[in-house]
Image (cartoon, helix red, strand yellow):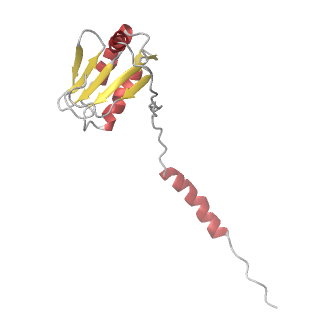
Amino acid sequence: MATAAELDLIPVLSLVVHLIPMLLLAVRFTALAQHDVDRSPVEATEAPSREKLEEQESERVVVRITATGFAVTGAGDGVTTLPCASPCDPGGYDYRALADTMAVAKGLHPTTAQVVIAPDPGVPYSIIVGVFDASRSRRQGDREVPLFPEPVLVTGAGEGAP
């Protein structure tokens, strides 16, 4: 009487044992920064008075991203301009100077948690992320100093925005 042939699993197990480490070496693990943007619905309320609007405007810090650099409102008298190095590519914008300017703005507006970020149309997303990072915190020595923890992105600001 003939016996059934046995199934030899050794070659399959050998392949799996060698294949798994190779696949794990090929996988690239990355950590991505996550920026929370508040998208809560706006509720209709009573219109604020002119005095209240002027008070809110004086407490607002706005970073406008243009093709030639940054324009920061709320870090002193008027608009502080920070031109980028030539050419104005993602590496040409001066994020360190922007963080320093944001620290000055935080000193002038210590209770304000929001900063309005208004990019011109066509500004690459990587530059907007850099502005988010520069406005949230600033490195002083070996510690992080919080600045404006609630950045607000305003799209479609157009040329007439601050």
**Is 107 in front, or is 42?**
42
* Residue drawn 42% across the image and 17% down it: 147
Above or below, comparing residue 72 to residue 124 in the picture: above
Residue farthest along the bottom direction in this orientation: 1
Residue 76 appears at what percent x and percent y? 28, 9
Q: Is residue 93 visible?
A: no
Between residue 34 and residue 76, name the one nearer to us: 76
Q: Quadrant of residue 133?
A: top left
Q: Where, quadrant-wise, is the N terminus in this rendering?
A: bottom right
Q: Is residue 80 visible?
A: yes
Residue at coordinates 46% horizontally, 32% vertically from top-left? 41
Q: Find residue 90 and report its horizontal and vertical position in percent.
A: 27, 34
Q: Is residue 37 left or right of residue 161?
A: right
Residue at image coords 73%, 78%: 6
Q: Nearer the viewer, residue 60 or 91?
A: 60
64 vs 45, left or right, is left
Give residue 38's position: percent from left, percent from top: 46, 30
Name above or below for residue 141 compared with residue 12. above
Picture quadrant where residue 80 is located: top left
Residue lying at the far left in this picture: please name it: 86
Question: Percent x, y for residue 146?
Answer: 45, 17
Q: Residue 5 lies in what quarter of the image?
A: bottom right
Q: Is residue 120 left or right of residue 21?
A: left
Quarter of the picture containing the C terminus is: top left
